[in-house]
Amino acid sequence: MDRQTTGLDFAVIGHQDNWANIRSLINIMRTDALEALPVSKIREVYDYIPPRAIFRMHVTSPLGMTRSGLYIETFIAPDKLTADHLRENIQKVRDAVAATYRLGIPMVILGGFTSLLLEGNIDDFREYGMAVTTGNTLTAAYVIKGIEKAVRQEGKRLRDCRVLIIGATGDIGMACTNYLKGKTKGVLLCARNRARLERFGRRIENEGHEVKWSTRIDELSGSADIIISVASSSDIGVSHLKGDVIICDAGYPKNLEEKLKDHPSVKLFHGGMGQLHHGYLFDPDYTTGFYRYPAEHLGHGCIIEVILLALENRLENYTIGKGNISEEKIEEIYALSLKHGITLAPFYNGNGLWPDQ
Ligand SMILES: NC(=O)c1ccc[n+]([C@@H]2O[C@H](COP(=O)([O-])OP(=O)(O)OC[C@H]3O[C@@H](n4cnc5c(N)ncnc54)[C@H](OP(=O)(O)O)[C@@H]3O)[C@@H](O)[C@H]2O)c1
């Protein structure tokens, strides 16, 4: 098929991480005349649906530029985001990227698990000549800036705090560790793969920073003043916590707060999110359906990264691979975010906005 020129500046390729969102998405896509489908029916067909465009996004910068993008859903089922389904999931991502190319879109962000599936291997897409990014630099920036703000707000000093990073050997986890290792009292690193964790921990130790690592969260959590969770796993639980710990949960699926019901003094926020103050419109508008948050115009750091690159006319593979996110890039992309009127999202969690927001 020939390439079309649709005038779109970027595409977001993504997936849903829970069936409640999927139910909203599918039933909004169907006409009002049709009876709403229950999750059990949707499950039967969901992953047979080929990747397709769901809505357009229009963004305006206070500097006057506007950019438009397209959200493409991969229809990867949340319970198939495992190694057993790697091959079929990768094919779905490839199909989504090919669809993006046919629409003449110059730049694409691989959101959530779609970037994890490829592990930075974008060689197959070089023939398309499109720029590809994971959006992890801005996600890490929003996580870090969120922690810095929460620490200030709670009357603490970062330098006096130890920070536990769950998912420390991942792309965002490494970026957070590298950024915070010299600015905090110490870093506590957790991940499941012992060898990879030890390699990373030794590197931080050899640089002269205070560091401990363990594959068990409970061996580290008692010393943590701050916890950053950037692990893509549904079986994470934290215990042995200091009463006033600040937690940034930026991983999917969201898994921590359900287990923290008995810790009312813990301050937990969903991190990695920004707020667009100068226009962020969806067409059709799904913000009352599956893309719903307790404040207006919130967006994922990864999506906002590609928006910023489009606003800046920077068609480049900005964040690719694992462990390549430097402090300089974090500061650069965060400064671009502020330049275009996009700030950190207010603090919120599953119960809504923090009372003081
Ligand atoms: N808010 C946003 O805009 C945004 C944007 C992008 C990504 N994200 C989310 O951020 C998370 C991290 O993304 P990433 O690209 O950095 O992923 P990644 O590179 O795959 O890293 C995941 C990390 O989590 C660890 N991990 C997985 N399960 C664990 C468990 N049960 N306990 C402890 N550690 C565990 C992994 O190491 P082991 O395998 O050794 O355990 C690895 O260190 C994902 O959940 C992603 O969906 C959010």
Image (cartoon, rainbow, N blue to C red):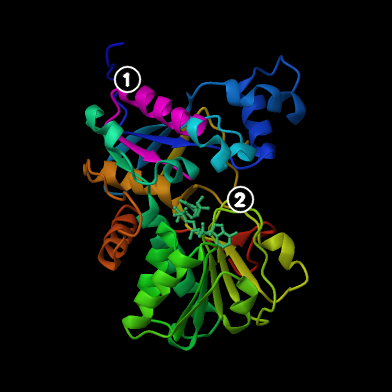
Q: Nearer the viewer, residue 88 or 105?
A: 88
Q: Main secondary structure of the magenta part?
A: helix
Is the residue indicated by label 1 positioned so its CB lies within 8 Å of ligand 1? no
Instruction: Say left or right for 337 vs 298.
Output: left
Look at the image and tell me whether residue 1 can be seen: yes
Q: Which residue is mark 1?
A: 102
Q: Secondary structure at mark 2?
A: loop
Residue at left offset 47%, top offset 88%: 160
201 shown above or below 320: below
Please state which amino acid type lies under the numbered disc 2. Pro
Residue 266: which quarter of the image? Answer: bottom right
Which residue is the extreme one toward the bottom?
Answer: 160
Give the x, y percent position of residue 128.
25, 27
Q: Secondary structure at mark 1?
A: helix
Instruction: Say left or right for 55 vs 128.
Output: right
Is the residue indicated by label 2 positioned so its CB lies within 8 Å of ligand 1? yes
Q: Which residue is mark 2?
A: 253
